[in-house]
Amino acid sequence: MFLDKLKHQLQQNPSLFIGEESAFRSAVLIPLVEVDGKWHILFEVRSMTMRKQPGDISFPGGRIDASDASPLAAALRETHEELGIDPNTVQVIGQLSPYIASSSFVTYPFVAVVDYKQIIDGYNKQEVEQVFTVPLDWLLQYEPYMHLVSIEPVPSLDFPFDKIVNGAQYQWRTRSMEEWFYDYEQYTIWGLTARILKYFIEKIR
């Protein structure tokens, strides 16, 4: 009886990973647009007045609010707020695997076709400095380059070293993070956006 109940409980709403419920959760949309009869991916340049990451290149998207019914709903809401796209006109093609940067940060990417004319006429100048597109054919042929960033844990000043073996001499594991770069005309796409872009391009090659 106990095992049957336990099995049932474990099957209820399984998390993607331990800590997902308390992680910073965001959702982004990879917008496919048709330009002169060819498919492009649209990118935003974040406004220089933004508090976080001004001038960075990104996909539309942002934090998932408690009022959002799902990660997709959040991605559509953010796309509407940033680019002026009516969610009812968005044709969702599919969802990519989530990007789990750490147990405290996860991003859910979606791929969708959007109306380029709506964007040109109505994007939010307070959040978006400009928009630009990159031909999908170009991305399929381009080879991004990579640099490593070393990440080393730094315990807080009140960390209880007396509770662990080797105390302050504990050997923390360091790791290297891959940072990918795409150079297109005057733009450089890197960071989270480049990582998601690279995964998407590899999926459709």
Image (cartoon, helix red, strand yellow):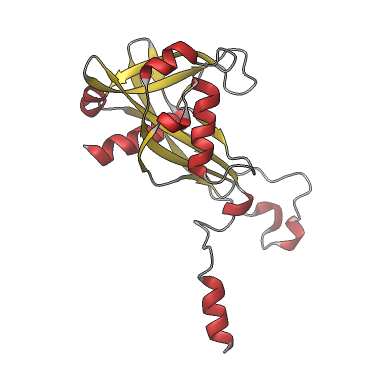
Residue drawn at point x = 57 percent, y = 22 percent: 53
Is residue 31 depicted above or below 101 in this figure?
Answer: above
User: Is 57 displayed left or right of 168 in the figure?
Assistant: left
Residue 80: horizontal and vertical position, in percent?
A: 51, 26
Does residue 151 show up? Answer: no
Front residue of 83/98: it is 83
Is residue 204 depicted above or below 145 in this figure?
Answer: below
Q: Among all residues in the image, which is located at the extreme right?
A: 158
Q: Quadrant of residue 194?
A: top left
Work out which quarter of the rendered image holds the N terminus and state it.
bottom right
Q: How many marks?
A: 0
Residue drawn at point x = 61 percent, y = 53 percent: 21
Work out which quarter of the rendered image holds the C terminus and state it.
top left
Q: Among all residues in the image, which is located at the extreme bottom?
A: 1
Is residue 117 depicted above or below 144 in this figure?
Answer: above
Front residue of 105/204: it is 204
User: Is 157 displayed left or right of 20 in the figure?
Assistant: right
Residue 6: horizontal and vertical position, in percent?
A: 56, 79
Residue 186: horizontal and vertical position, in percent?
A: 37, 10
Q: Among all residues in the image, which is located at the extreme front?
A: 88
Does residue 177 show up? Answer: yes
